[in-house]
Amino acid sequence: MYCPECGTLIPPGEEICKGCGKYSSQIREELLALSEKMPASKCKKCGADVYTGQHYCVTCGVDLKA
Ligand SMILES: [Zn+2]
Ligand SMILES: [Zn+2]
């Protein structure tokens, strides 16, 4: 999965994001909370739902601010 904060790829089993030092368990909880909200838009690259406050696409890692 990709870190929604910094866009770094977090391999399965990895405990901490190498980009920003966030715990993957914490990130997963945030993603769960986000998925309960209505998507704000779609990723231009892969079409995945994008939620308010996300800086990077969780599916493909594209920079959503660009
Ligand atoms: Zn990160
Ligand atoms: Zn995407």
Image (tube, rainbow, N blue to C red):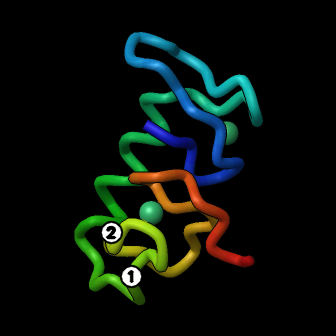
Q: Give the residue at x 40% y 88%.
A: 40
Q: Give the residue at x 47% y 70%.
A: 45
60 horizontally vs 63: left or right: left
Q: Is residue 27 above or below residue 11?
A: below
| Quadrant of residue 43 within the rendered picture | bottom left
Q: Is mark 2 within 8 Å of ligand 2?
A: yes
Provide residue 27's location: percent of width, then percent of height: 48, 41
Residue under label 2, please give it.
48
User: How many neighbours does mark 1 have within 10 angstroms: few (below 14), some (14-19), or many (20 or more)?
Assistant: some
Indicate which disc residue 42 carries.
1
56 horizontally vs 42: left or right: right
Q: Is residue 16 above or below residue 24?
A: above
Q: Give the residue at x 65% y 33%.
A: 22
Provide residue 58's location: percent of width, then percent of height: 45, 54
Mark before the other along the chain sequence, 1 or 2:
1
Determine the CA span between mark 1 and mark 2: 5 Å
Q: Secondary structure at mark 1?
A: strand
Indicate which disc residue 4 carries.
none
Provide residue 53's location: percent of width, then percent of height: 58, 74
Q: Give the residue at x 64% y 47%.
A: 7
Q: Nearer the viewer, residue 38 or 65?
A: 65
Task: Kindly identify the amino acid type of the residue bearing the numbered disc 1.
Answer: Lys
